[in-house]
Amino acid sequence: MAGPIVAFLEGEGVDGRGRTIFDVLGMDDAGLELTHDFIQWLFPLPEPSSAVPDAPVLTAADVEAIRNSIPAQCVLAAATDRMEAFYRATHAWLQAHDHNHLRITRIIRSLRLLRGDGEADAFRDAILSFVEATRAPVSVRSRGYWATA
């Protein structure tokens, strides 16, 4: 049986703080920057988060359910668009090291698992294009993680 992450991504459940997917997607840029426990719900992975120990961990059943769920796929597309807009609108992350670099790696990995290579590569390419266009000093290490995520 699929876990609470599926219900959250289908718009029928809440995250660990009682927020719905609509609450999270409705956060303004400052809220996204200052809130550190939403990204694990928005873009889950099959291993525990070191930053948020009580974050959900994807099971094989969750992955299958999310990949086959039209509502979850629509939410993931909206979440991807929201995070891309966040990274275009904010510039604090455009430095050698920033916690958002870990978020970006998570997003790419989660998209690859839950939506496919095309969606993961498109998000990664958009981020790398923005880094190049702004000539940001993002570390080679971070860019390497994004390239292999």
Image (tube, rainbow, N blue to C red):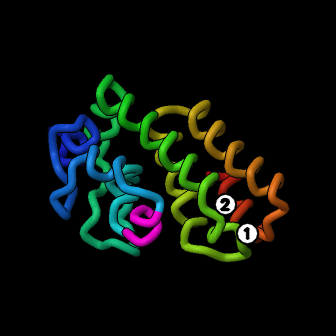
User: Magenta segment: does it hold 36?
Assistant: no
User: Residue 71's image quarter?
Assistant: top left
**Above or below 78: residue 52:** below
Q: Position of residue 111 (x, y in %)?
A: 50, 41
| Amino acid on which the number 1 mark rests in the picture | Arg
Q: Which residue is mark 1?
A: 141
Which disc is residue 122 wearing? none
**Above or below 31: residue 72:** above
Q: Residue at x 37, y 69 (%)?
A: 35
Q: Which residues are magenta?
A: 30-35
**Above or below 77: residue 14:** below
Q: Position of residue 124 (x, y in %)?
A: 66, 46
- Say which of 64 and 142 sits in front: 142
Specify the quadrant that holds the N terminus: top left
Kindly check if marks 2 and 1 are in contact, taking CB atoms under 8 A apart as contact: yes
Q: Which residue is mark 2?
A: 145
| Amino acid on which the number 2 mark rests in the picture | Tyr
Q: Residue at x 73, y 75 (%)?
A: 96
